[in-house]
Structure formats: C-alpha cells, structure tokens
Image (cartoon, grey):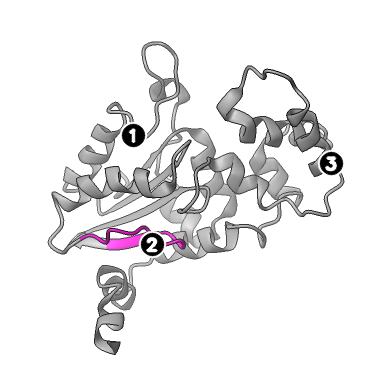
Amino acid sequence: MSRIRLICEGRTEWELLNNLASEKIKSLIADIPKPASENLKDAKGRTVGLGNSALLPRLRNALDESTCKVVIVICDAESKEAKFTWQNIRGELDKRASKSIPEVLPSIGMDLWINDDKRVGVWVMPDNLSSGMIEDFFWSAIPETDREKPLAEAFVKGIENPKFKSKISKAKLYAWLAVQKDPSANPWQALNWNRIKKDQGKIPDFLTWIEQLLSDSSEQRNEAMYPNDALDEAN
C-alpha cells in the first residue's frame, strides 16, 4: 500500500499530477489509486467538495493512518476565497499537529510536517488565494495570444440565463477544448499538446510545490516543518 494519500475532488486532480510531474514524482505516486468519480458524489449525484462533511472524513482517516506518511490535498475554493477552504483543512491539521499551523495559506501552496512522521501538502485551486476551481488553473495557463480563447469566453458570456450558473469557468474551458484538434479533448491532453502551457499561470508554482512536498531529504523536512523560523530569526 502506498504511503501517500491523495485527497481530491475527482479524477482531474489525479491526472494533473500524472501528466505534470517529473518521472521521479510519477514513480512515487504510481501506487495512488485513480479516484473513482462515483465515490465522490453524494446520494443525489452532486459532486462532493472538501467543505462537505462527506470528504472531510477522508482527510481525517489519512491523517490518522499510521502507514500514511504524506497527505496531498488538492481541492477547489469554489465560490469563496481560498482562505475559507484552508480554515476547514487547518482545523483538522491543528487537532493533530505538534506545532502551530499557519493561519494563512501561502500563495505557493502549503507544505509542512504536522508531527515527526506526517507531512501534509495543501493546494486550493486555482491559486491558493482566489475563489474558483481547477478549470481556472488551466485557463490561466492558456496564452492570451491563443486564437480560440477569447472566442470561447465570448461564447459562454453570450448565453442568456445559463444552466451552468456558478460553473462558468468549467464552461469556458470545455468550450475552448471543444475546438481543439480533438473535440473530445480533456485538459491533460491539452497539456501534452502544449496548448495549455506548463510554464504559464500557476503551473510552475504548482510543480515546485509538489516536487518539494514529495522530497524525502532532511533539509527539505526542516524547511517545510518550520517555514516561519527563518523570518522569526531575521526579526
């Protein structure tokens, strides 16, 4: 069984890791099971978010599992700023941590050891600051010079009384994907085609975060566990 647990809202986050990470990181996460979307919906078929009580137990279980050494949390901020989602997560970490948990989620993602043998990483889509979702994360990495980007955005904005309402970001991204070389394309395929750029938007910060999080060196461990110590000493 993998010592790494991925707490996310669906398959897209798993595919993001599998398609963006280095070969070294891919080998580390190879044993993480691909999320089954049917397990991430409630009885009425609605997608379950991290703020929903149905997903928080998964986080608690991972934190309390002795064989689990690294917990990766990737979730959407949805309609509120990321700080509100972070407070839900922070509450669970604080109950188990041997050191105080930062009140503010860094814009480059959270990476810390909550005790001697448990490391936790948190990334709240799209950018650890704003409201939004993983589709905003992908959208920001499509170059502004892309021909279809403004057309997809204009198309979605032009729909009166849209049924998707709060899912405008998702609608924009998939409208754009629908006019790529394969109309059934998904975001990770667009990454592999280099239509979504790995060096734009928040993708570089995300890659740095996941690479550091899954590092096993003691130097990285100390830096991650005590992220504010250097600032304290400087002051």
Residue interval drawn in magenta = 101-112
Would residue 35 be found to the left or right of residue 136 on screen? left
Asked whether 80 or 229 is in front, the reply is 80
Point out which mark residue 104 bears.
Answer: none
Q: Residue at x 70, y 49 (%)?
A: 192
Residue in view at x 67 percent, y 53 percent: 141
Q: Main secondary structure of the magenta part?
A: loop
Q: Verify CB contact (< 8 Å) between mark 3 and mark 2.
A: no
Q: Which quadrant does the N terminus fall into?
A: top left
Q: Residue 69 location in percent, x, y?
A: 25, 54
Q: Which callout, 1 or 2, points to the residue nearer the camera?
A: 1
Q: Which residue is mark 2?
A: 213
* Residue 44 drawn above or below residue 126: above
Of the two numbered discs 3 and 1 on the same chain, state the one appearing first in sequence: 1
Disc on res. 148: 3
Q: Of helix, strand and loop, which one carries label 1?
A: loop
The crowding category of the residue bearing disc 2, from other C-alpha atoms within 10 Å (few below 14, some 14 to 19, many at least 20), is many
Say which label, 3 or 2, has the lower sequence index.
3
| Whole-number angstrom distance, CA of label 1 to CA of label 2 | 23 Å
Splitting the image into 4 quarters, where does residue 99 fall? bottom left
* Image coordinates for residue 154, horizontal then vertical, percent: 80, 34
Circle 1 residue: 51
* In front of the other: 199 or 51: 51
> What secondary structure is found at the residue carrying circle 2?
helix
- Residue at point 44% right, 40% down? 80
Residue 215 % position (x, y): 38, 66
Q: Quadrant of residue 70?
A: bottom left
Verify whether residue 110 appears in magenta: yes
The mark nearer the N terminus, 1 or 2, is 1
